[in-house]
Image: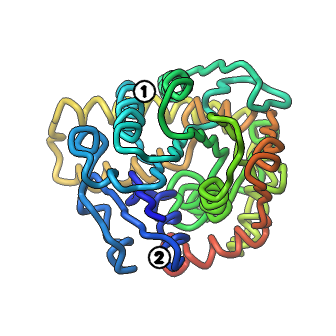
Amino acid sequence: MKIVIFGAGGFIGGWLCEELADRQDVELVACVRQWSSAVRLARRGLDVVQLDLEAATRDLTVIASADVVVNVSMPLPEREPELALRLYSACAVAGVRKFIQFSSMAVYGDRTGDVDEDTPLAPSDDYGRGKAQMERRLLEAAAGSGPQLFILRPTIVYGPFSDAWTVRYARRIAVGRWRSLGWAGAGTCNLVHVQDVAKSVVLTVRAQPDSKSHVLNINGPELVTWNEYIARFGDALEVRDRTSMNPLLFSLTSTAVHVVRKAGSWVKRKSIRLPLQSAPALVRTAQSVVNLYPTPEELHLLRRKVRCSRDRAARVIGFSPSMSLDEGLRQSVAWCRVHGVV
C-alpha cells in the first residue's frame, strides 16, 4: 500500500511517518514544503520529496500510484480551503482511493458543553473559519466521484515535538512556577497524545466503512481541567516552589503583556531598529516575559468548558486512545530534558 503524506515535516506529520516507517506493508512517501523541515525524517532514512500542495496539484507524479493521501499540512487559513480542494480533485484524477484531511476542534468556536460531529460549526477566528470552509468544500466535492473522504478533528495535541502544548507549557511551569491558575484555568483541557493521533490515521487507513465521507473527532482518554494539566505537568517536571496564581491579576497581566506583544510585532514588521547597544538583550528579555503569558484567545480557551466526543471515531474506525495523561507527561518530560527545554 502506497501512502503519501503532505506536511510530513511538521509535528503530527513527523509522528505519523515514524508510526508508518517500519510497517512492511506500507510504501511511504513523505512530502515536505522545505528541506529544512526534513531533518527528523532523514534520520529515519525515509523517502522524502520536496513537494507542496500547489505543486502536487500540477504534477500528479507522486500521488499517481498512491492508495491513500494524508494531508496534515498547515497553509495559511485563507488558502487552505482552495488548496485542500485542489489536492482532493488531483487525487480523484490520479485514482487515489482514500483521502485523509486534518482539521481542528477550532471549527466549534466558543461552544461549551458536549459537542460532537453533528454540532453546528461556529468558528470564531480566521483559523477556525478557514478549517470550516475547507471541510464544507471537501464534503461537497466528495458527494460526487473521487476518493473516500475522512476529515479528522484532533483536539489539544500534546507530546514530544509539540511547541504549543508541551514546550511552551513546560517553560511556563518551570520559569513562572505555575501550579494553578484558579478560575482562569478551570476550563476543560481536551488532551490527546500525538501518538494516539498517529494511531487514528493508521486505523483510518485500514477502515472500510460503507459511507463515502466521514468527519471524526479525535480526543484522548481523560478529561481534565487546564489547572489539573498544569499541576500534573509540574509534578512530572519536578518543579519545586510552584504557586497558585491570582486569576484576576493573571488575566490582567496577560492582557497587558499582549499589548507589548502586539507592539513588538509592529516594530518587527516595520523593521525599526532600536538605537541602543543593549537592544538585542532587551528584546530577548521582553520575549521571555511575553512567552510566559497566554494571548487573549488562549485565556478564553483556558476558561472554556467543553467536552469533545470521540464516540463516532470509536464506531467508524475503532479508535480508542491508549496513552494515559501520566504516561504522556512522563514521555514529554523525558523528551524536554533531552532537548534542553527545561
x, y percent for residue 92: 41, 37
Crowd band around label 2 with a 10 angstrom C-alpha radius: few (<14), some (14–19), many (20+)? few
Q: Are marks 2 and 1 in contact (CB under 8 Å)?
A: no
Horizontal side of 24 relative to 56 (left or right) equals right
- The type of residue carrying mark 1 is Pro
Which residue bears the numbered disc 1?
81
Tell which of 123 and 182 is nearer to you.
123
Residue name at image x 50 percent, y 36 percent: 257
Horizontal side of 136 relative to 309 (left or right) equals left
**Colour convention of the picture:** rainbow
Visible residue check, residue 173 = no
Q: CA distance from mark 2 to mark 1?
A: 35 Å
Residue name at image x 36 percent, y 74 percent: 46
Instruction: Say how many tags the image has.
Output: 2
Kindly report which numbered mark, 2 or 1, lies closer to the viewer in this rendering. 1
x, y percent for residue 82: 37, 26
x, y percent for residue 236: 73, 72
Query: For numbered disc 2, what is the local secondary structure?
Result: loop
Tell which of 172 and 282 is nearer to you.
172
x, y percent for residue 135: 54, 28
Q: Which quadrant of the view contains residue 59? A: top left
Crowd band around label 1 with a 10 angstrom C-alpha radius: few (<14), some (14–19), many (20+)? many
Q: Which quadrant of the view contains residue 240? A: bottom right
Q: Locate the C terminus by quadrant.
A: bottom right
Residue name at image x 58 percent, y 30 percent: 297
Visible residue check, residue 165 = yes
Q: Which quadrant of the view contains residue 311? A: top right
Tell which of 221 and 256 is nearer to you.
221
Q: Earlier in the sequence, mark 2 or mark 1?
A: 1
- The type of residue carrying mark 2 is His
Query: For numbered disc 1, what is the local secondary structure?
Result: helix
Which residue bears the numbered disc 2?
339
